[in-house]
Amino acid sequence: MGKISTKDSKDKIRHKPLYKDITETGTLSTGKRSKQSKNDDEDFDDEQVLDAAASRRILKLAREQQEEIESEENHIKVAEKPRFQMISPESDDSDADAAYEDMTDEGEDEYYDDDEVEEIDEEEAKLFDSYFKSGDNAFGSFNLADKIMAKLEETKQTKTEQTERPQDKVFLPPRVIEAYEKVGQSLHHWRNGKLPKLFKVLPSIKNWEDLIFVTNPEAWTPQVVYEATRLFVSNLTANKAERFVNLVLYPRIRQDIEESDEHKLNYHLYRSLKKSLYKPAAFFRGFLFPLIQEGCTTREAMIVGSVLTKCSVPVQHSSVALSWLLEQEFNPATTVFIRILVEKKYALPYQTIDDLVLYFMRFRVITDQNKNDIILDDATEIAEQRRLAQSPPMPLVWHKAFLAFAQRYKNDITEDQRDFLMEVVRQRGHREIGPEIRRELRAGSERSTTTAPKEDKEDDIMSFF
């Protein structure tokens, strides 16, 4: 095998030396400077001179462009000036005066060149007009007061539309109204089974009152009324449950009693009324109080009173309801509820017991002998007492309520109150019930004034409603 010649291979492998690459970058200097390095330095200096000249030319061009931009801006500012502008006497610039005269004599079209006028897009013009609307001012300035007055007028108009909007209509999406109308159609024939899911979610919806009227509650079956009462009373607060009882249950029960032949209440509606007592405040404020205020018949009072008799009601709510009933005008239906609440034998606070005593003392006949013993506020109350004295005998329900009070609270009244009540029995007594009331009052003991009252609470009892 022959030798390989290294001469040819060295010529082929030969490349640029490393020191040349280093010296070209300018980071390394050698002691001896060859001719080749001198030539390289001269080329490098030439390149530096060219770069400085180029930079000067660039700066010159930039300066010229800046001057052109400033001249264009000056032309635009002149164009924005109004055609008939007063020049202040303090201005002494003769060139400005000449420019103003040329502009007023020859016109804007002759003053500006066609090349310098730029066309404005329609969108930009609309945007400009939206911010700067021309009004009475000749300069077309922006009038902020007009915009504020227009906004106030708009809000006032929307408020008037809301107040004039009829309250008996439901403003809901069409799809929602259509869905709950179908639910209402199914509830008109529902007897048993599962209620529609759209109806079950009503208590969790904010505007449930609007949605429930879309289903037409007047046409619900009695079974639906009972299930709806369970659903709403158990899932809503006392204030919202009061709305349901007053808007749905109250008119339905009164209508059923009035339309029935024997003036009886449907069994399912009766159960609904009992279920509404799960929230006593909702029952009293949403059903009982409106019933008394709108004129309750004795038959309605007996039916509703039987619910109160069978159901347990907290003493706080019962005492407040009793105090409210005692302040109303005399009515046999009102007396029915008073007797029922008294017969429940609550440990009533002394405030409610004093209200009961004053209620029965209202029917005391005023004579010349006892006129000084009665403390009355004014002459109108005396006239009311005399009117009651001339009225026919008291109904039997009043005597029963008086007897129930004497039997239960004879030991919770003072001696003065006992004397006044004895006189009421003597004047207004019943031939059979009167002697029993007198015997109960005489058997009672005086209320102790040293002991604390039964309901020693910081809050007023009326705060429960």
Image: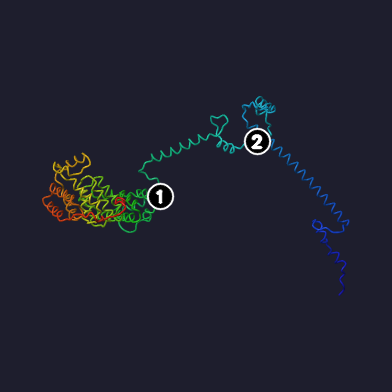
Above or below, comparing residue 97 to residue 354 in the picture:
above
Above or below, comparing residue 149 to residue 450 in the picture:
above
Of the residues shown, which amino acid type is indicated by label 1?
Val
Taking depth in this image into account, of 107 and 145 the one nearest to the observer is: 145
Q: Helix or strand or loop: what does disc 1 sit on? A: helix
Q: Helix or strand or loop: what does disc 2 sit on? A: loop
- x then y, percent, for residue 102: 68, 26
- x then y, percent, for residue 398: 17, 49
- x then y, percent, for residue 310: 23, 57
Which color scheme did the rendering employ for the protein? rainbow
Above or below, comparing residue 463 to residue 13 in the picture:
above
The residue labelled by disc 2 is 118
Q: Are marks 1 and 2 in contact (CB under 8 Å)?
A: no
Residue at 68% x, 32% y: name it: 114
Residue at 46% x, 37% y: name it: 152
Note whether residue 300 is visible: no
Position of 442 with respect to 465 (left or right) is left
Q: What is the residue that sits farthest to the top in this orientation? A: 105
Of the residues shown, which amino acid type is indicated by label 2?
Glu
Quadrant of the drawing holding the N terminus? bottom right
Report the label total. 2
- Locate residue 363: give its quadrant: top left
The residue labelled by disc 1 is 176
Taking depth in this image into account, of 96 and 159 the one nearest to the observer is: 96
Structural crowding at the residue carrying mark 1, measured as other residues with C-alpha within 10 Å and reported as few (<14), some (14–19) or many (≥20): few
Task: State which mark lies toward you, 1 or 2.
Answer: 2
First in sequence: mark 1 vs mark 2:
2
Position of 339 with respect to 66 (left or right) is left
Taking depth in this image into account, of 246 and 47 the one nearest to the observer is: 47
Residue at 31% x, 58% y: name it: 192
